[in-house]
Image (tube, helix red, strand yellow):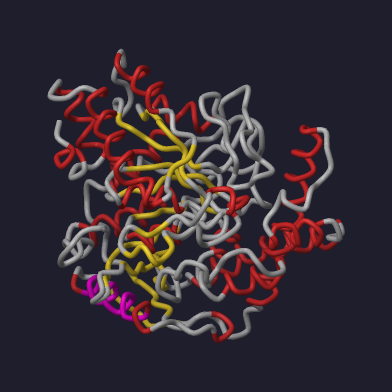
């Protein structure tokens, strides 16, 4: 298979060729590795590459699962894999190893994915851009090298947008799938809390905010991947409602006429850039043309967004302490000034002062937001918002150089509509429905009720089928 043929097809199409005997899994891996060697260094998208090992592994591959042996990438998020060390984007955590796979890694393998590298992340996955000091430089946006690919799944998004793989692992604790999807022109779904397993080493991430998933170029790849890996894990603290049928099955028909509420203004008076507002306009009009009812709405004015940002900040700071102290204990040493970037170092110090009562209050606030957001959907099937309130950040604009609280407040004015959905646990997706005159993708977010991931992907697939996702000209640099 030629590289130009490989990079045009989505994961299911490539898997179909393997199943039909038209191409081997080894040939696909060779394409992915060649493209990675050509494109990943300029993007700074990959780490812990295992090219020769992965090629040897796949040469005797017996196709299995819906993805039958296609190349794949694991996020450098600390998800446990016996094949790949992890750094979580941090010098302190560099070359962490694992004795056992995470449940999700085993399920990815059973689905037919063959990882050959990890993808770059910001330190401890706590930034909306991927500019970790540990990685030796920023991860660049394939559409504009002066801008970020997003974070924390920035390397994953850059690799998929650049054609290295059609689909890659991502995770989302405050927008970390949807931010890079918006920045790189991809489909990024944050599934309902409890849909994708997080064990066996942990039961939740960041007080229930974090979920794992994938980024892809097509809705059907994400739907098939989540069908393959989702499902209740014994002992898990959360479980999403069981869908009456799988996500792929839901793509077989268009959604019924939906009532879609559109939020054009943001919480706490945060400004929305004209291009981001335009993306919502275009997407809403597209939905109207598909027969859906578009209804103007707005975030409730009395919602305490600043209070939510503070709760989010304190939960993350407490988790920095948990992670750092655990790593230092394993290394048998104390913390050094060069171990952490300035914002994370400050977050560690602040986290040590977070009392049990304040942590519990933050979790209670998250739970109240679940009910708040459910109320915001009264009268609607779907809520639509900008994904980001600004264009993809210029490199250097959101690096972790200041104190942790100030950094989080700056982030809250960039990804304003995203982290709140991590608190609510609802499904939400960024759709690449708009491109600026300068060929920058701008995402629009759609949000469903808890457990209605099927309706979110149904609507996304209907929009995708219009052809609006494709830029009018050009391709990533």
Residue 290: % across, % down: 20, 68
Residue 381: % across, % down: 39, 66
- Indicate the quadrant where residue 284 lies: bottom left
- Residue 424 lies left or right of residue 327; in this view the side is left
> Residue 408 or 31: which is nearer the viewer?
31
Q: Is residue 396 above or below residue 237?
A: below
Does the magenta segment cover residue 287?
yes
For the point 62% across and 79% down, which residue is it? Answer: 303
Residue 186: % across, % down: 33, 56
Q: In the picture, which quadrant includes the N terminus?
A: top left
- Indicate the quadrant where residue 341 lies: bottom right
- Residue 422 lies left or right of residue 363; in this view the side is left
For the point 26% across and 70% down, which residue is it? Answer: 435
Q: In the picture, which quadrant includes the C terminus?
A: bottom left
- Residue 172 lies left or right of residue 314; in this view the side is left
In the image, farthest residue toward the top: 60
> Residue 242 or 263: which is nearer the viewer?
263
For the point 50% across and 56% down, which residue is it? Answer: 130
**Residue 381 seen in the figure:** no
Residue 404: % across, % down: 70, 66
Does the magenta segment cover residue 99?
no
Q: Is residue 263 above or below residue 252?
A: below
Q: Is residue 443 above or below residue 223?
A: below
Q: What kind of secondary structure does the magenta stretch mostly adopt?
A: helix
For the point 36% across and 45% down, which residue is it? Answer: 40
Region of the chain picked out in magenta, as a range: 277-288
- Residue 344 lies left or right of residue 80; in this view the side is right
């Amino acid at each position: 298979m030629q590289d130009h043929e490989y990079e045009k097809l989505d994961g299911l199409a490539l898997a179909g060729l393997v199943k039909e005997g038209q191409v081997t899994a080894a040939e696909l891996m060779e394409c992915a590795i060649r493209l990675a060697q050509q494109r990943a260094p300029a993007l700074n998208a990959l780490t812990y590459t295992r090219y020769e090992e992965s090629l040897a592994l796949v040469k005797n591959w017996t196709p299995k699962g819906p993805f039958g042996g296609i190349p794949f990438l694991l996020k450098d998020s600390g998800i446990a894999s016996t094949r790949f060390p992890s750094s979580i984007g941090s010098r302190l955590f560099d070359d962490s190893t694992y004795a056992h796979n995470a449940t999700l890694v085993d399920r990815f393998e059973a689905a037919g994915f063959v990882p050959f590298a990890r993808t770059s992340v910001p330190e401890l996955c706590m930034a909306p851009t991927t500019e970790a000091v540990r990685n030796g430089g920023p991860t660049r946006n394939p559409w504009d090298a002066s801008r970020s690919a997003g974070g924390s799944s920035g390397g994953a998004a850059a690799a998929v947008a650049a054609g290295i793989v059609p689909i890659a692992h991502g995770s989302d604790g405050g927008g970390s799938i949807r931010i890079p999807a918006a920045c790189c022109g991809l489909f990024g779904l944050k599934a309902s809390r409890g849909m994708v397993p997080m064990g066996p080493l942990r039961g939740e991430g960041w007080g229930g905010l974090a979920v794992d998933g994938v980024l892809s170029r097509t809705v059907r790849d994400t739907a098939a991947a989540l069908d393959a890996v989702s499902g209740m894990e014994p002992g898990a603290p959360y479980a999403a409602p069981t869908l009456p049928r799988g996500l792929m099955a839901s793509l077989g028909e268009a959604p019924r006429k939906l009532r879609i509420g559109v939020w054009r203004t943001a919480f706490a008076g945060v400004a929305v850039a004209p291009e981001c507002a335009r993306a919502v306009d275009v997407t809403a009009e597209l939905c109207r043309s598909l027969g859906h009812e578009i209804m103007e709405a707005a975030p409730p004015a009395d919602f305490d967004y600043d209070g939510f940002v503070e709760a989010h900040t304190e939960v993350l700071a407490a988790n920095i302490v948990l992670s750092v102290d655990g790593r230092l204990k394993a290394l048998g040493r104390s913390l050094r000034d060069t171990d952490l970037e300035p914002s994370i170092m400050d977050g560690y110090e602040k986290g040590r002062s977070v009392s049990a009562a304040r942590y519990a209050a933050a979790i209670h606030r998250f739970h109240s937001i679940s009910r708040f957001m459910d109320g915001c959907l009264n009268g609607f099937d779907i809520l639509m918002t900008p994904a980001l309130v600004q264009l993809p950040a210029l490199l250097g604009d959101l690096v972790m150089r200041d104190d942790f609280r100030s950094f989080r407040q700056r982030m809250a004015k960039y990804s304003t509509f995203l982290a709140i959905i991590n608190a609510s646990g609802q499904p939400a997706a960024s759709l690449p429905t708009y491109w600026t005159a300068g060929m920058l993708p701008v995402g629009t977010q759609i949000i469903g009720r808890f457990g209605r991931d099927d309706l979110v992907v149904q609507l996304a697939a209907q929009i995708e089928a219009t052809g609006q996702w494709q830029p009018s000209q050009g391709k990533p640099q």
